[in-house]
Amino acid sequence: MGTTQLETVPEPKYWHLKTVLSDALDSEFAVGEILPNERDLAARFGVARATLRQALEQLELEGRLQRRRGVGTTVAPPRVGVEVGPAQGSGTAWPGAPGDAWHTEDHEEAVPPAPVGRLLGAPGTPVHAVRRSRTTGGQPVATEVLYVPGTCVPALRLSPADGAAAGAERAEAVLRELQQLPLESQERTVELGSARADDARRLDRLPGAPVLVVTTCYIAQGRTAGVAVSTFRADTCRLSFGDSEGIPALAG
Amino acid sequence: MGTTQLETVPEPKYWHLKTVLSDALDSEFAVGEILPNERDLAARFGVARATLRQALEQLELEGRLQRRRGVGTTVAPPRVGVEVGPAQGSGTAWPGAPGDAWHTEDHEEAVPPAPVGRLLGAPGTPVHAVRRSRTTGGQPVATEVLYVPGTCVPALRLSPADGAAAGAERAEAVLRELQQLPLESQERTVELGSARADDARRLDRLPGAPVLVVTTCYIAQGRTAGVAVSTFRADTCRLSFGDSEGIPALAG
DNA sequence: TAGTGGTCTAGACCACAAA
DNA sequence: TTGTGGTCTAGACCACTAT
């Protein structure tokens, strides 16, 4: 005990700064309000701009702030809950089932990424790739690619001569065909990732922005009949896996 | 003449660097191998150390690298899948049910954080707080606090005179008592957070490290009878919500 | 003690959005 | 054009680990 540890707290400046700013956001700012710019804030707290930015980055990661180049830093609204679990009261269901919150955008035939190819049991084989997106209050919150082997939707007739204009229609045709397949189960994983350039553009973020990557395996006829890779903005989303609707429905 | 750089790709250096390093990790390094130190790497790529660090941070966020102060940067093993969903084949269950993967550590009576208090319907009221932890392969992957109102475990007799030594025992007593309560349903959310100082220590990370925060509401007797806030290391974990076991069991 | 990653500085310039 | 956040530099020192 001899060493009376008087404030030997080597707490980093940016960490302390983050706490101070966080408290200020709670008490002195309203949602949507614009903060002073980074140079002013840094001067006000007597730190370098890089240090101030370290604190802001943390707060943005936690969904407290929103920063936009050329515009400024604003106080972010609370994270929106995004339902990801079993569809409304119906247990598991294929993408594109009635009432699902996604918007179908496009379709192409492509070789899936290696991890997805392994899940589908046929690495390197071209499959249907259906691009979908999801918005909340006009803001994009997620983008998704659903990979479906051609053998799982055998009745599908695609005329390659249709051209690019029919992308969304072809995508919907794949989803319609999927509903015919009896879905046995699904399995989901969630992990942290950083947005690739194309996803970042769709999500209105910069490349590298933190995202929650939800991978869903759809099991039908004893095999993995589809894999959806959904990319959610980590700064604005809270993923919700609700059993409160699904379980009672199954029990009743 | 280095100025053969005709293509003015406004791609940030750190982003390009990250890609280069990522490819190198795939082809030239084995899991656990130590990378050259940051100063050497920066020199080798002809960038400032801060820029190199920006690329390393991204790779660490994606679980590709592990950095430890005083030691070095090593190639991280693939993320471990951590089962978070319905317990093995038994549908929903209380924490502490047989076979659950958590280790009970401690107990105290405390006022929960405001958001948890709201979920429990009684902000500002002291409740049981049970601390648990989870490891995989000897590495800590998650820490959790389960908040349970005293009114939900009325049969529990705690002797305050027991002292601190009985913390784990008191915690287990709370969990035992919970099993008596019929669990109606549960609801989970997942969001990105940054580790507070105490959680960071438990997870063997620095404060501010990215974590996946899983909030579970346990519903019993028509009310929220417990709230668990579980904090998983985002760099090493992939959360797995498996329905493949639970759904068939319920259907049969 | 030596070597590592973590923090911090004080600049500079760039890309972007809005006036 | 102006002002914002985003990128980058070339240093410095600190905290930690292993020897």
Image (cartoon, coloured by chain):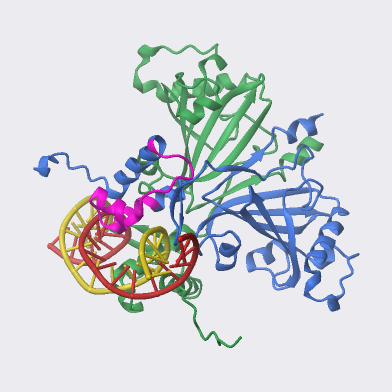
Chain colours: A green, B blue, C yellow, D red
Tell me where residue B36 appears, x and y as whole percent: 36, 50
Please report the bounds of the magenta region as a residue range.
B28-56
Task: Please name whichever residue, A237 or B176, is drawn nearer the observer in this view of the structure.
Answer: B176
Q: Is residue A40 left or right of residue A200?
A: left
Relative to A206, residue B145 above or below: below
Give the residue furthest to the left. B1
Tell me where residue B222 appears, x and y as whole percent: 81, 54
| Residue B72 among magenta residues | no
Counting labels gives 0
Residue A65 visible in the displayed image = no
Q: Is residue B196 left or right of residue B148?
A: left
- Specify the quadrant of the image occupied by residue B90: top right
Residue plotted at (64% across, 51% down): B138
Task: Please name whichever residue, A115 or A27, is drawn nearer the observer in this view of the structure.
Answer: A115
Relative to A48, residue A141 above or below: above
Where the C terminus of chain A falls, by quadrant?
A: top right
Relative to B162, residue B129 above or below: above
Residue B146 visible in the displayed image = yes
| Residue B44 among magenta residues | yes
Tell me where residue A249 appears, x and y as whole percent: 76, 37
Tell me where residue A117 appears, x and y as whole percent: 50, 25
Relative to B224, residue B64 above or below: above
